[in-house]
Amino acid sequence: MRLVHISDLHYKQGSKNRVLELLERVKKAKPDHLVITGDLTGQGRESQFKAVKEILKDTGFYDYDRLTVIPGNHDLFGFIYRHYSDDDENPLSQLGDGVPLRDVIANLISFLAHFTDFQEEDYEQTITTFCKHYSEILGGITEFPFTKKLGNNIALIGLDTNHFVPQFSFTLKDCVKAVRLRSFDPLGMNVTGATGWTDVPKFKRLCQDHSLTFQRKIVLLHHHLKSRTVVAQELEDELRHPDIWAGEMRLDNRVALSNAIKSCGAKLVLHGHLHWNDDYQLSDGTPVLCGGGTEYDKSYNMIDIRPRSIKYEIKSLR
Ligand SMILES: [Fe+2]
Ligand SMILES: [Fe+2]
């Protein structure tokens, strides 16, 4: 069984050829199954979900037995782009270098004003929208995690590691929720969903399902399992403030999830979000692969699952 893993397509207007080219190249590796670990779209727009689906159909991947997808933060936090054009993938870039201070202040106020429109119920709706668009691939599920069997003894477990943290809200209910999630974000810094969290007890319950006992489990998530310190070190030469970036891109309950993955005996973990292809291990040696995006690291992960081994390789498309 050959899996190909890619991530973070970030589809937006004008990306069709880029995504099409990647999928055509991936096809040449003759995968039995393709896994895309989130950020299929740049801004979570309905038109973008439809366009990605069309490309997956055109390239022959759009089939339950040939493809698995999970959502990334760009797919579910699309609400922040509602008031912006397709070209503004990140409205916060309008606050960046070279923008006059007066415009930065005006843009910031406008951005925050739009953002407070958004409520938790809207966020739940975005998950429903994602599941609806890819229902044939997700087997009609309406919530995560889910499992999909491949062949006789491989089970994919797809998680949703995105979550909505109450923003700009200091009501007792929202403060309690923030404490419960151990995610403190009173200034709404998680506006793009860069910081993730997932329901670990739910994942553990699913792993206890007897039908998974003799399956080789492969866990799919969007956010990564590296520590902030490691990510900051890796980006030391790339960014001016790698510590800030690494802090924002974290999975809040990374340690709890990593422990649960180890306990369930998973054979492999696949994720995205970091935008470069990479492989590392959990403390017990469980391999973890990060999928790059076509916009950034032009590579894919090729994984060959044999009866007694799992071999993987990062294939460059350059
Ligand atoms: Fe991404
Ligand atoms: Fe992401």
Image (spheres, helix red, strand yellow):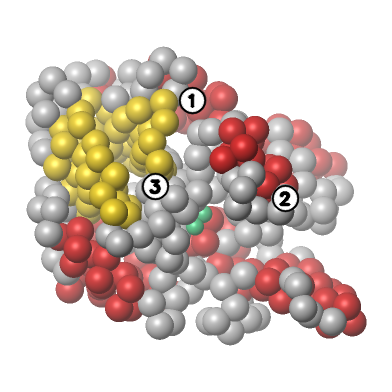
Whether residues under marks 1 and 3 lie with C-beta atoms below 8 angstroms apart, the answer is no
Q: Is residue 276 above or below residue 146?
A: below
- Asked if residue 195 lies left or right of residue 168, the reply is left
Q: Nearer the viewer, residue 318 or 209?
A: 318
- Asked if residue 210 lies left or right of residue 2, the reply is right
Residue that appears at 64% across and 40% down: 232
Q: Which residue is mark 3?
A: 277
Looking at the rendered structure, the secondary structure element under dot 3 is: loop
Residue 40 figure quarter: bottom left
The amino acid sitting under disc 3 is Asn
Whether residues under marks 2 and 3 lie with C-beta atoms below 8 angstroms apart, the answer is no
Q: Which residue is mark 1?
A: 258
Residues under labels 1 and 3: Cα distance? 19 Å
For this orientation, the residue located farthest to the front is: 237
User: Which-is-in-front pick, marks 1 and 3?
Assistant: 3
Q: Nearer the viewer, residue 273 or 128?
A: 273
Assess mark 1: CB under 8 A from ligand 2?
Answer: no
Q: Which residue is mark 2?
A: 241
Rate crowding at label 2 as few (under 14), some (14 to 19) or many (20 or more) other CA atoms within 10 Å: few
The amino acid sitting under disc 2 is His
Residues under labels 2 and 1: Cα distance? 26 Å
Residues under labels 2 and 3: Cα distance? 21 Å
Q: Would you say residue 316 is visible in this rendering?
A: yes
Q: Quadrant of the N terminus?
A: top left
Whether residues under marks 2 and 1 lie with C-beta atoms below 8 angstroms apart, the answer is no
Q: Earlier in the sequence, mark 1 or mark 3?
A: 1
Q: Earlier in the sequence, mark 2 or mark 1?
A: 2
Q: Whole-percent x and y of residue 225?
A: 51, 34
Q: Is residue 212 above or below residue 312?
A: above
